[in-house]
Image (cartoon, rainbow, N blue to C red):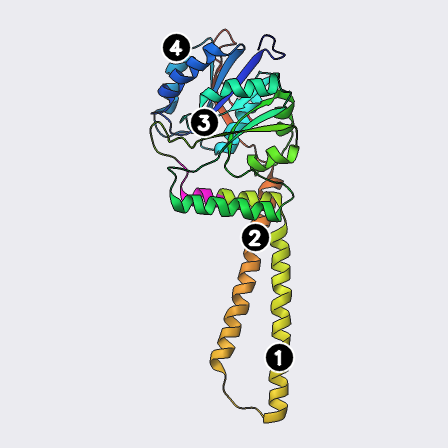
Amino acid sequence: MDKLDYELLSIVVPCYNEEETIPIFIKEIKKEIKEIKLNVEVIFVNDGSSDKTQEILQDVYTNNKSFVRVIDLSRNFGKESAMLAGLKYSKGDLITVMDADLQDPPTLLQDMIYAICEEGYDAVATRRHTRKGEPLMRSFFARQFYNIINKISDIDIVEGARDYRMMTDQVAEALLNMKEYNRFSKGLYEWIGFNTKYIEFENVERVAGNTSWSFWKLFKYAVEGIVSFTTMPLRIASLLGAVVSGFSFIYMMIIIIKTLVFGEVVRGYPSLMSVILALSGVQLLCMGILGEYLARTYTEVKDRPRYIVKSILDFSSNSDEKELKIS
């Protein structure tokens, strides 16, 4: 690459309890920065960590003021909010989002830059083409999630897609213009469009520490994705209600005819209870589906800020900036 149309690369790194991985990450990213023919800023976003992450980030900033910025959120708002904060405060005309645990290989940065600068893509995303090393149960449910959401929604999410991607500032601006409170970035990336290239890589284990993504958190995230990008569950609830109502009507007609022909006999308690329990289960299921959509509507109309910035360590200012910002 002899000539680049872009000058500054912003690398956004959301952090939650990453005290063990940050020193390793900064060491590896500095190696890659030396090979990149762009100015680089690394923006760490501390998402309300409960360990020593912020203290370590302050040391990293002190030792690398020429290219490191640190945004400290007032509490844990979740990775989606941390990524959003990083995008908002990034100054680059190229922006990358990646994790601090090195499961997103920094060595791919050169290929991503090439794809945008030389091949003309608007964004470059990554995906794991294998899930080697991941628990079998988690892999199974992850595959089922992608199968389900791609069948019932209007977007196609690439299986194994990571949040690790590089984009132009135009793409980042489009993401920032998506104002919803409940965010599912994998879906948002696909919804906004743009010409995107996918780079495949082998699954990489965390360099240190433990993941904060439990099975329950992943399940809630999957529900968030489905509810955010399709109303199909509401249609299924309506269809299920219609089907059950149809069977109930048929069963009622059978009972009426049987009574007229053979007379009424006091019996059928087991079948009666089965019908009642079945109908109650369907009603509760449909109410639960409605509740999921209603809950998200409730959080949207409150219009609360998606995150609150407690402090910023910024190399571009003469002194360390510390202030409360709400976004």
Looking at marks 2 and 3 on the same chain, the residue that comes earlier in the sequence is marked by 3
Residue at 64 percent across and 20 percent down: it is 120
Using the numbered discs, state the Cα–Cα distance from disc 1 to disc 2 in whole angstroms: 30 Å
Asked where in the image residue 130 lies, by quadrant, the reply is top left
Residue 215 colored in magenta in the image: yes
Looking at marks 1 and 4 on the same chain, the residue that comes earlier in the sequence is marked by 4
Tell me if label 1 and label 2 are in contact, CB under 8 Å.
no
Query: Which residue, given by chain and number where applicable, does mark 2 sit on?
Result: 291
Residue 185 colored in magenta in the image: no
Q: Nearer the viewer, mark 2 or mark 3?
A: 3
Query: Which residue, given by chain and number where applicable, does mark 4 sit on?
Result: 63
Residue type at the position of mark 2 = Gly
Asked where in the image residue 136 lies, by quadrant, the reply is top left
Query: Which residue, given by chain and number where applicable, does mark 3 sit on?
Result: 104
Residue type at the position of mark 3 = Asp
Using the numbered discs, state the Cα–Cα distance from disc 1 to disc 4 in whole angstroms: 78 Å
Query: Which residue, given by chain and number where applicable, does mark 1 sit on?
Result: 252
Tell me if label 4 and label 3 are in contact, CB under 8 Å.
no
Quadrant where the image shows the C terminus: top right
Q: Secondary structure at mark 2?
A: helix
Looking at marks 4 and 3 on the same chain, the residue that comes earlier in the sequence is marked by 4
Looking at marks 1 and 2 on the same chain, the residue that comes earlier in the sequence is marked by 1
Q: Nearer the viewer, mark 4 or mark 2?
A: 4
Q: From the viewer's perspective, tell me whether residue 29 is left or right of residue 38.
A: left
Tell me if label 4 and label 2 are in contact, CB under 8 Å.
no
Magenta segment range?
Answer: 212-220
Using the numbered discs, state the Cα–Cα distance from disc 2 to disc 3 in whole angstroms: 36 Å
| Dominant secondary structure of the residues highlighted in magenta in the image | helix
Image coordinates of residue 292 in percent, x first then y, are 56, 50
